[in-house]
Amino acid sequence: MAEILTLENLGNLVMLCFLQAVLGFDNLLYISIESQRAPVAQQRAVRFWGIIIAVALRIVLLFVMVRLIESLATPFYVFNWPGILEGGVNFATIVFVFGGVFIMYTAVKEIAHMLSMDHLGEGLEAKSGKSAVQVIALIVTMNLIFSFDSVLSAIAITNVFPVLATAIMLSGLAMLLLADGVTEFLKKNRMYEVLGLFILLIVGVVLLGEAGPAAAHAMHDDSLQIRIFGYPLLPMSKTTFYFAVVVLFAVEALQTGYSRKLQAQRAARQKHRA
């Protein structure tokens, strides 16, 4: 135990907690939005058990990846269609592609639902068309997909399993503490739910980009980089992603403030005319 509590491991733990916090924002957003698809009375329990089960499975995933990282990294297929599709495909590639497509599909479907005429006048509870078990299963599945890049990044920092597991448990605790607050905020500020769905759409694009160099990075072989029509499929920088998120929130906040100001001016004019 004393060997684990070294200055290096404590420093790695702090760094991993920061990494989990940064990479876990999109995960928390997904949990807050998806949990509202469950029956209203069960939404809080859905968030709690979804996060608990997901964190437990993430630790299992971490344990498996620490032990089998080399076998997971080996490409099981290499595309060799010059000028059309080139590059290697490994387990990480499949996870990123599946996760990206599924998240984009979810975001587009919910945006389309919110724009439909049938949605007007509905409350958030009216969107519930799934059982609590179904929503928990989705949250757990997507939590694992969201966590794949953070798990890979964590392993790159250290391979000390207790340190990695502690960082994951602390991030899970943070999600438990914040999930209810984020959900209540979205209920009271419906426009921010639309914003959240667009952020999820961007997250899907980010995951698709992560699929491009997955095999190349794992095998340290640039020839395995996925290329589509001769152009490399590159991941979006995390800095770019979070800058885009900040800009979206800033625009929404400014637009909301401006709308309230206009409404106040109109109300004052109507009162003056009356």
Image (cartoon, rainbow, N blue to C red):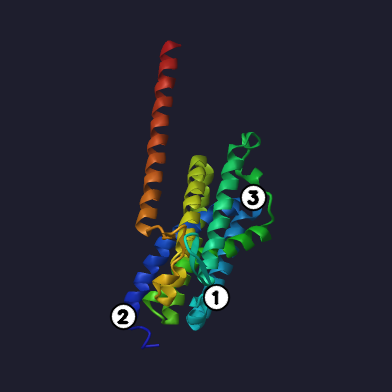
Other-residue count near label 3 (Cα within 10 Å), few / some / many at <14 / 14–19 / ≥20: some
Q: Position of residue 174 (x, y in %)?
A: 46, 63
- Residue at figure coordinates x 46%, y 67% from the top left: 149
Q: At x 39% / y 68%, what residue is drawn?
A: 17
SS state under label 1: loop
Of callouts 3 and 1, the N-terminal one: 3
Residue 151 visible in the picture: no
Q: Earlier in the sequence, mark 1 or mark 2?
A: 2
Q: Nearer the viewer, residue 176 or 146?
A: 146
The label nearer to you, 1 versus 2, is 1
Circles 1 and 2: CB atoms closer than 8 Å: no
**Outermost residue toward the left in this view:** 7
Residue on which disc 2 sits? 8
Q: Which residue is mark 3?
A: 40
Q: Amino acid at mark 1?
A: Phe
Residue 223 at x, y percent in the picture:
42, 71
Q: Identify the element where label 3 is drawn.
A: helix
Mark 2–mark 3 Cα distance, whole angstroms, equals 46 Å
